[in-house]
């Protein structure tokens, strides 16, 4: 596998509570993995659509939910895996949830139309918070899905469309922006060891640089401008703030 698969505690061959998570962005994948564990799920994460198909094919009755990122390599978006994998596995009764941000591949309205064709049980379009919304609702969603046959559940997809944001819905960028805002004297080189020891300092520094570029903040008083942007936009990320 191109990215190491990670699975939480083993509990025998039971579907209850197990989530197969397919996401190619390591920081998002780790964040979502931890969120799922905190909510009592038993997640396994893989890094691309081929590994996701292989993991599911190796034991198709193991997982209660397959959570798929919208933009997965090597396909353009989720549509190939959505239209093939979902169609093949839905009669086995795992519930397929698709989440992510679609701007680089297709407009959200067109993405919604295509995802309806995939017959996923549930899908969310928008920023990183969309995935938090899905995780927060997962228990309720699974309970409601189990009240229907797979064909009935899959005929009632739900869409949460969210407006684009300049940080592309990336929770790591948002979290670094928040840290910079709340710690005005913090040097860039201090961010990783203090807040993200699991990540390379250069990687976190690059994220900080990308934040200023994406927000098109003037070089003068960048940190102050970032603080203003944060205050104006924090409503987008209420769940991430709660989690932090």
Image: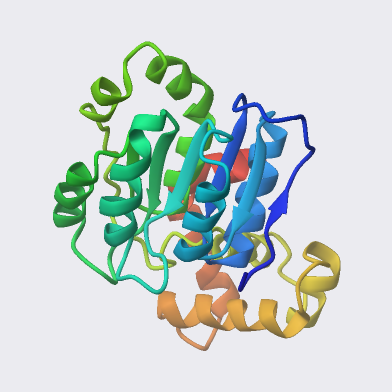
Residue appearing at x 55%, y 58% in the figure: 171
Residue appearing at x 42%, y 45% in the figure: 130
- In front here: 213 or 230? 213
- Give the quarter of the image for residue 227: bottom right
Which residue is at the far front?
58
Q: Residue 87: image x %, image y %? A: 28, 43
* Image-based side of 44 in relation to 110, left or right: right
Which residue is at the far top?
147
- In front here: 63 or 187? 63
* Image-based side of 62 in relation to 151, left or right: right
> Is residue 128 in view from this perspective?
yes
* Image-based side of 89 in relation to 83, left or right: right
- Give the quarter of the image for residue 27: bottom right
Residue appearing at x 59%, y 74% in the figure: 223
> Is residue 217 in view from this perspective?
no
- In front here: 135 or 228? 135
Q: Residue 65: image x %, image y %? A: 50, 35
């Amino acid at each position: 596998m191109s990215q190491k698969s990670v699975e939480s505690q083993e509990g025998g061959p039971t579907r209850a509570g197990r989530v197969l998570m397919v996401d190619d962005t390591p920081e998002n994948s780790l964040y979502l993995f931890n969120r799922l564990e905190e909510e009592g799920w038993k997640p396994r994460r893989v890094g691309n659509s081929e590994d996701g198909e292989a993991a599911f094919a190796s034991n198709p009755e193991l997982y209660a939910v397959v959570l798929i990122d919208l933009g997965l390599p090597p396909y353009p978006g989720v549509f190939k895996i959505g239209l093939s994998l979902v169609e093949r596995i839905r009669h086995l009764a795992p519930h397929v949830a698709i989440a992510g941000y679609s701007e680089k591949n297709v407009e959200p309205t067109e993405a919604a139309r295509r995802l309806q064709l995939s017959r996923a049980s549930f899908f969310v379009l928008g920023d990183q918070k969309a995935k938090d919304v899905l995780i927060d609702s997962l228990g309720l969603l699974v309970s409601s899905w189990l009240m229907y046959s797979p064909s009935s559940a899959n005929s009632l997809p739900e869409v949460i469309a969210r407006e684009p944001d300049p940080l592309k819905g990336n929770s790591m960028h948002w979290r670094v922006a928040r840290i910079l805002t709340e710690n005005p004297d913090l040097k860039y080189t201090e961010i990783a060891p203090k807040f993200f020891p699991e990540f390379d300092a250069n990687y976190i520094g690059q994220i900080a640089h990308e934040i200023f570029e994406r927000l098109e903040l003037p070089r003068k008083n960048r940190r102050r401008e970032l603080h203003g942007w944060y205050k104006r936009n924090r409503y987008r990320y209420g769940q991430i703030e709660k989690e932090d």
